[in-house]
Image (cartoon, rainbow, N blue to C red):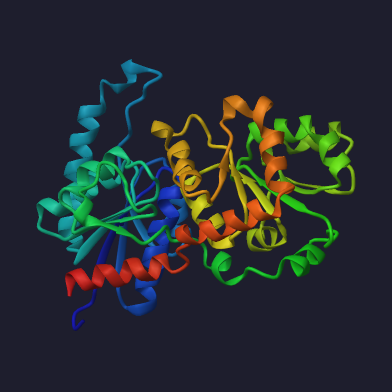
Amino acid sequence: MDKKLKILLSGGGTGGHIFPAIAIADEIRKRFPDAEFLFIGANGKMEMEKVPQAGYKIEGIDIAGIDRGNLLSNLGLPFKILKSLSKSKRIIKNFAPDFAVGTGGFASGPALYEASKMGIPIFIQEQNAHAGVTNKILSKKAKAVFTAYPKVEGFPAEKIKFLGNPIRENIVSGMQETAQAKEKMGLDKDKLTILSVGGSLGSRTLNNAWKENLDNLKEKGYQLIWQTGKLDYSELSSSLQIPDSIHLKEFIKDMELAYSAADIIVSRAGAIAISELAVAQKPVLLVPFPFAAEDHQTKNAMNLVEKNAARMVKDSEMKEKFWNTLSEICENEEVRKEMTDNLKYFAKPNAAKEIVDEIFNVIK
């Protein structure tokens, strides 16, 4: 391309929306080091901090979603939407991007809507098996919709490109042989090892499940890498008698090493977590977070369950089903092998690269 490329990106509210947008920007910057990037985010949301940390400019707009807990607080919402549309229009007019990419979240609605009205090509990246409201509306104007699942309700089928979610490069390139990873983590390489991850804040549901099954773990001789999250770490580490076979961690920095060391993984069913688990290629038991918007974590999990690439236990059924379902995976090597083989269908280690390839195929 002769002229300097300009790319507009918008997505936020959660890491699941922000990090795919940053990964796509990083991939474009690799190819076009002189390209100019501008993000549009929601004031007060985490993208206003995370995007500059990744080395990109961001402008904030005043936008929020419907507050279902306090309906009176929604009275100012129409005004906020009009104000955010007006500011987005001004930002986009001044920046004059060649195309725009939206990854969901409040800010991407006004930003991509105004871009499409100006005739700027827009692209959507949807992380979940269930389309978010913003992305559903925008998809009608989009040149393509990039998804992590082959079918996503709410999108025009002809626009869907099943290319996966961009994930951290170190997960793609840093996976190691299981026995070697166990030794690096100070684990017994001959013991079956379970990794439990509940997201960056941890999961009280998973923490309670492990508390209730400490005796079962000891009896079976399984090792557990238990990521508790910040909220429960102090209480768990001080109140429980933790045997040597259980490795309690508030946060896991080297996720690729932990994934590598695991024989089985127990996890929430966030979109990016599932994309990483598919690349890690380990048998997985999913426990979806029941309060995710439109119960999208359950829908994410069901896509894997239907292909026999994972097992699932609902939050409400943990007491009755957790240990039995986990035992079925732990005690049956054939089940583990089948799940690992089936996970390959969802593994998209080159998602960012393939998404960017597709964008440039469309706009060339």
Residue 341 on image: x %, y % = 55, 60
Kindly give the residue lying farthest to the front in the view shown: 334
Q: Nearer the viewer, residue 141 or 61?
A: 141
Residue 210 on image: x %, y % = 75, 36
The residue that appears at 84% across and 60% down in the rendered structure is: 190
Relative horizontal placement of residue 220, taking residue 202 as reference (left or right): right
Relative horizontal placement of residue 184, taking residue 13 as reference (left or right): right
The residue that appears at 86% across and 49% down in the rendered structure is: 245
Quadrant holding the C terminus: bottom left
Q: Nearer the viewer, residue 308 or 212?
A: 308
Quarter of the image where one finds residue 56: bottom left
Quadrant holding the N terminus: bottom left
Residue 40 lies, with reference to residue 208, above or below; the image says: below
Q: Is residue 231 visible?
A: no
The residue that appears at 61% across and 26% down in the rendered structure is: 317
The residue that appears at 54% across and 68% down in the rendered structure is: 172
Relative horizontal placement of residue 114, taking residue 180 as reference (left or right): left
Residue 136 on image: x %, y % = 25, 42
Residue 292 lies, with reference to residue 5, above or below; the image says: above
Kindly give the residue lying farthest to the bottom in the view shown: 2
Quarter of the image where one finds residue 356: bottom left
Q: Could you tell me how many numbered marks the image carries?
A: 0
Q: Is residue 73 visible?
A: yes
Residue 196 on image: x %, y % = 68, 46
Q: Nearer the viewer, residue 207 or 313?
A: 313
